[in-house]
């Protein structure tokens, strides 16, 4: 017996139920295919880099004096401060770019008993340390003068062992952020389009995007002082955006 003849013999309600079932099954199959296609995505990264130049320099020149007589040690420190400030002014800095650092005084024998002090060499009992901070927008001048520290040492100023030179700061990150994010997004889209092409698909809209964190490093791995970003005038700003695209 043909299927059509069987259907004629079925009650009308069963025909309706079967038809609804066939339609519902088609809906789920079609909806499943749609969801499968909609779930096709590709996640890519886009890199943007920009070379920048520091716009501010901060330079701490620290020195100390030691001795047995506190007043004489302080007098020597006053001389060193005057020599250092004059050295900086002679080399092109303005007074408003200079600031004296705090003075620290240390008694190496504080807490010693009288008997212990008698057996100790008191010539280096007192240590006074201070210095001059330079804060300037003239980063190239700071870099140039910082290489002349020998001239100051020859005047008898004892620069301390922790001297590491100036640090250079770039304050213009907010001015370049938008441009760099646009560049990173553009590069991410180019990578996504290539992936879609290889997969015989086309790139759709953005599903999710993470702009990433901006990082600042020394432009050159080794410069005159160090590969430390803070001691490099020339810097490289970098951001990596992670973007997920739909595939069509």
Image (spheres, rainbow, N blue to C red):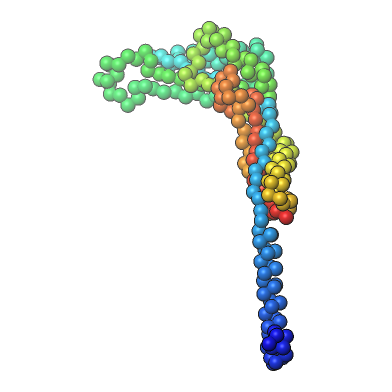
- Count numbered badges in the picture: 0
The residue shown at (56%, 24%) is: 227
Q: Nearer the viewer, residue 203 or 210?
A: 203
**Measured from the top left, where is residue 218 in percent x and y?**
61, 27
Task: Determine whether 62 is above or below 193 in the image.
Answer: above
- Name the residue furthest left: 115
* Left or right side of 213 for 176: right
Q: Is residue 57 something one can see in this rendering? A: no
**Horizontal and vertical percent for residue 122?**
34, 15
Where residue 88 sits: x, y (%)? 62, 15
Give the residue displayed 37% in from the left and 17% down from the top: 125
Residue at the (46%, 15%) spot, across then down: 65
Q: Residue furthest top?
A: 154
**Quadrant of the snapshot with the C terminus:** bottom right
The answer to whether residue 146 is visible is yes
In this orientation, which residue lies closer to the viewer: 115 or 242? 242
Name the side, left or right, on which 126 lies relative to 225: left
Q: Considering depth in this image, is 73 or 230 the residue closer to the camera?
A: 230
In percent of width and height, residue 2 lies at 70, 85
Q: Residue at x 62, y 14 (%)?
A: 145
Locate residue 141: give its quadrant: top right
Looking at the rendering, in which quadrant would you find the N terminus? bottom right
Q: Quadrant of residue 120?
A: top left
Q: Is residue 36 above or below residue 131?
A: below
């Amino acid at each position: 017996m043909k299927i059509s003849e069987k259907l004629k013999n079925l009650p009308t309600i069963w025909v309706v139920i079967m038809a609804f079932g066939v339609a519902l099954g088609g809906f789920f199959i079609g909806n499943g295919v749609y969801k499968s296609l909609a779930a096709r995505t590709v996640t890519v990264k886009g890199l943007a880099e920009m070379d920048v130049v520091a716009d501010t320099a901060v330079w701490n020149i620290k020195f100390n004096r030691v001795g047995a007589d506190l007043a004489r040690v302080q007098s020597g420190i006053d001389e060193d401060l005057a020599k250092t400030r004059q050295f900086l002014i002679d080399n092109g800095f303005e007074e408003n770019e200079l600031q004296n650092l705090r003075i620290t005084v240390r008694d190496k024998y504080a807490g010693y008993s009288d008997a212990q002090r008698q057996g100790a060499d008191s010539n280096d009992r007192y240590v006074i340390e201070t210095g001059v901070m330079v804060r300037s927008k003239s980063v190239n001048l700071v870099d140039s003068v910082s290489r002349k520290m020998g001239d100051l040492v020859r005047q008898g100023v004892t620069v301390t062992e922790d001297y590491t030179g100036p640090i250079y700061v770039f304050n213009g990150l907010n001015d370049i952020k938008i441009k760099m994010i646009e560049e990173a997004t553009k590069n991410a889209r180019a990578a996504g389009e290539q992936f879609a092409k290889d997969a015989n698909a086309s790139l759709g809209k953005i599903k999710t995007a993470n702009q990433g964190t901006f990082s600042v490093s020394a432009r050159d791995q080794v410069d005159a002082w160090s590969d430390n970003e803070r001691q490099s005038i020339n810097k490289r700003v970098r951001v990596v955006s992670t973007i997920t695209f739909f595939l069509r």
